[in-house]
Amino acid sequence: MDQLRETLKVHHLRTTTCREDVLSTFINRKNALSHGDLEGALGENYDRVTIYRTLKTFLEKGIIHKVLDDEGLRYALCSHNCSEEKHQHDHIHFKCSECGETNCLENLHIPAVNLPEGYHPEHFNLLIQGVCPKCN
Amino acid sequence: MDQLRETLKVHHLRTTTCREDVLSTFINRKNALSHGDLEGALGENYDRVTIYRTLKTFLEKGIIHKVLDDEGLRYALCSHNCSEEKHQHDHIHFKCSECGETNCLENLHIPAVNLPEGYHPEHFNLLIQGVCPKCN
DNA sequence: AAATATTCTGCAACCCTGTTGCAAGTTCAG
DNA sequence: CTGAACTTGCAACAGGGTTGCAGAATATTT
């Protein structure tokens, strides 16, 4: 509980129940969540718009990051402290076609790619779809 | 013109002006297109729904493939003849943060990744964001 | 502890994406 | 050139995502 407040404080965000609840939902479920997932979990307590704004704020502050998905955006906690100034994500996302869960494979880094002359890469986003260990 | 009809025929699709126009838009602009792009290009001639259905059909038949993007789905031509049975895409997509264009880097393959025990990968989707040669 | 400035929230409204059902219009094969 | 099969347009809907604004909550100052 106090850890939630601490996290918010570090990022210069006011403590509100919505932010605490969204944050703890991310911590409890460990996989990437869509806005719909959060609305399903918290929708009776908060307005859709508030959840959207909370996600947007968390994105800007470096608390969560976007996860690309073939059927819509999801969001996941940033593991290593990102900040407003700098997001660092070169890990891989795995989406299971059975259970539908998308997870960060924090320990696996995206391999280097030799881009042609003139390309200046800044961010990498690798989504692998397949069957996860649980559904195997 | 005949080439368009030929392509449609190969995939067992009837020749309609909408399909021809969508297909030629993909061929002329070479980058990945969103539904909105197509609606902008052809919207006065065809209903939104028809464009959606055309995209869906082309996806199923293996004429185009989805391109993940952090701000919505896009679509691009399949270069090497995909079919209804089998899509094969392990190339890289590059999105330029300056001009906003997303392009397929057909010649670059996604490097192999050593997944932990139990993961069975099927599809790979790598989006690299940065600055492209044109905007450099 | 109260007043203030600042920040959040909820509501209403809006636009975009994507889908479905149905009737009318096209395409293609015989 | 006729019919069966397919495609289109329209209407309607559900969901994602955003903005403006008034009222509520939080943090800060005294």
Image (cartoon, coloured by chain):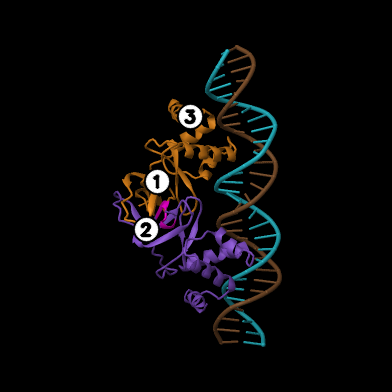
Chain colours: A orange, B purple, C brown, D cyan
Could you tell me if residue A35 is visible in this image? yes
Q: Residues within 10 Å of mark 3 (few under 14, many from 20)?
A: few
Looking at the rendered structure, whether the residues under marks 1 and 3 are on a common chain is answered as yes
- Foreground residue, B126 or A49? B126
Residue at mark 3:
A12
**Element assignment for label 3:** loop
What's the amino acid at mark 3? His
Looking at the picture, does residue D1 appear above or below residue A51?
Answer: below
The residues colored magenta run B126-134
Question: Residue B44 at x, y = what percent?
Answer: 64, 65
What's the amino acid at mark 1? Asn
Chain ID, mark 1: A
Residue at mark 2:
B122
Q: CA distance from mark 1 to mark 3?
A: 27 Å
**Element assignment for label 1:** strand
Residue at coordinates 49% horizontally, 69% vertically from top-left?
B27
Could you tell me if residue A97 is visible in this image? no
Q: Nearer the viewer, mark 1 or mark 3?
A: 3
In the image, residue B59 lies in the stretch drawn in magenta: no
- Foreground residue, A69 or B23? B23
Q: Earlier in the sequence, mark 1 or mark 3?
A: 3
Q: CA distance from mark 1 to mark 2?
A: 16 Å
Residue at coordinates 50% horizontally, 65% vertically from top-left?
B29
